[in-house]
Image (cartoon, helix red, strand yellow):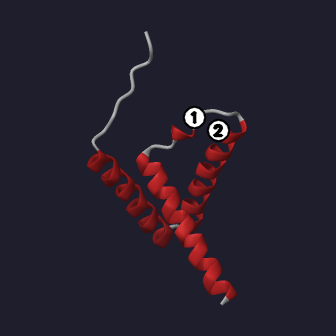
Amino acid sequence: MGAETRHRPRGATVALALLGFALAAVMLVLVPPLALAFGLVLVGVLIWTRATHQDAGVLTPPAAGFLAAVVVYVGLALFYAVG
């Protein structure tokens, strides 16, 4: 027997990703170093799964939303630092 997979409705997945994004946005305002550290850990997880040829779907929707917010934050910080 194969492993069963659990599928969420698309709306629930989007809502969870937005929740992760919102959590990161709040953390980036209140405690930026901690939020950046979490983002760095998530990037490490992605790199590790790619290097070991594992499923890159290990990031849950909230984690993906969190990582997206951190990437936006870092991108804006670099944009303002350079410009």
Viewer-closest of 54 and 60 = 54
Sort mark 1 into few (<14), some (14-19) or many (20+) by Cα contacts within 10 Å. Answer: few
**Residue sitting at the far top:** 1
Residue at x 28%, y 47% (from the top left corner): 12
Residue at x 66%, y 85% (from the top left corner): 81
Q: Is residue 37 above or below residue 30?
A: above
Query: Looking at the rendered structure, which numbered label has been put on residue 55?
Result: 1
Residue at x 35%, y 29% (from the top left corner): 6
**Which quadrant of the figure contains the N terminus?**
top left
Viewer-closest of 71 and 53 = 53
Residue 26 is situated, as x and y percent measured from the top left of the image, at 42, 67
Name the side, left or right, on which 72 lies relative to 12: right
Name the side, left or right, on which 45 lies relative to 13: right
For disc 2, the marked residue is 49
Residue at x 63%, y 52% (from the top left corner): 43
Q: Is residue 44 above or below residue 69?
A: above
Name the side, left or right, on which 30 lies relative to 41: left
Question: What secondary structure is found at the residue carrying circle 2?
Answer: helix
Q: CA distance from mark 1 to mark 2?
A: 6 Å
Query: Looking at the rendered structure, which numbered label has been put on residue 31?
Result: none
Q: Is residue 16 above or below residue 58?
A: below
Question: What secondary structure is found at the residue carrying circle 1?
Answer: loop
Amino acid at dot 2? Thr
Labels 1 & 2 near each other (Cβ < 8 A): yes
Amino acid at dot 1? Asp
Residue 63 is situated, as x and y percent measured from the top left of the image, at 47, 50
**Residue sitting at the far bottom:** 83
**Which quadrant of the figure contains the C terminus?**
bottom right
Residue 54 is situated, as x and y percent measured from the top left of the image, at 62, 33
Sort mark 2 into few (<14), some (14-19) or many (20+) by Cα contacts within 10 Å. Answer: some
